[in-house]
Amino acid sequence: MQQNNHHNIEDEQLRRLFADFNPPISPASRFMERLERDMQRVEMVKEATLRLQRRNRVAVVLAALAGFVAGVVFMALYPVFSQWMEEVRIAIPVVTAEAGYMIWIVMLALLTIFASLGTYKSCIHLWPMAPHGIG
């Protein structure tokens, strides 16, 4: 009996607690308008994400291509650089053939890095992120 009385007291306390709880209920049309607006926002975010992914993929491909082309062009210039380094070694005997080769490698690396990064940054900067597939 005492346990049953305890439940009744708890039930009464819960009823009093929720007696004043009267949340505003918006009409169904407002709910649907808000739902549609939220769904449109989700679609806009999805479209923007797809455009961003496409732009980044193109930028990475172009950057890799630019780095490759820069490396090929720079390697084609190796005979000219080699001849110039030979003149430097004659003028400055401290410079060894290995040092000249290391200078060449560093210049090659820097050129390809700058060509790749410059191309990537240019693509990212110049490719507009306009809506509806324009960008």
Image (cartoon, rainbow, N blue to C red):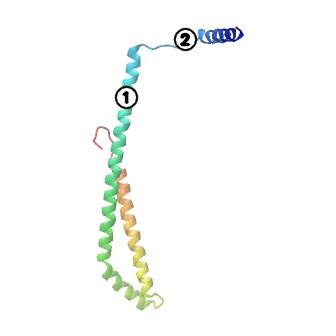
Secondary element at image label 1: helix
Residue on which disc 1 sits: 39
User: Where is residue 124 drawn, in percent x and y?
Assistant: 36, 51
Q: Which mark is residue 22?
A: 2
* Along the line of sight, the residue nearer the viewer: 126 or 70: 70
* Location of residue 127 with respect to 7 vertically, above or below: below
* Along the line of sight, the residue nearer the viewer: 20 or 113: 20
Name which residue lies at 41% across and 82% down: 101
Q: Which mark is residue 110?
A: none
N-terminal of the two: label 2 or label 1? Answer: 2
Q: Amino acid at mark 2?
A: Asn
Q: Residue furthest right?
A: 2
Name which residue lies at 37% across and 28% down: 39
User: Where is residue 133 drawn, in percent x and y?
Assistant: 28, 41
- Quarter of the image where the N terminus is located: top right
22 on left or right of 106: right
- Quarter of the image where the C terminus is located: top left
* Location of residue 42 with respect to 31 vertically, above or below: below
When asked about the image quadrant of residue 52, the answer is top left
Bin the neighbour count of mark 1 within 10 Å (Cα to Cα): few under 14, some 14-19, many 20 and up: few
* Location of residue 7 with respect to 114 vertically, above or below: above
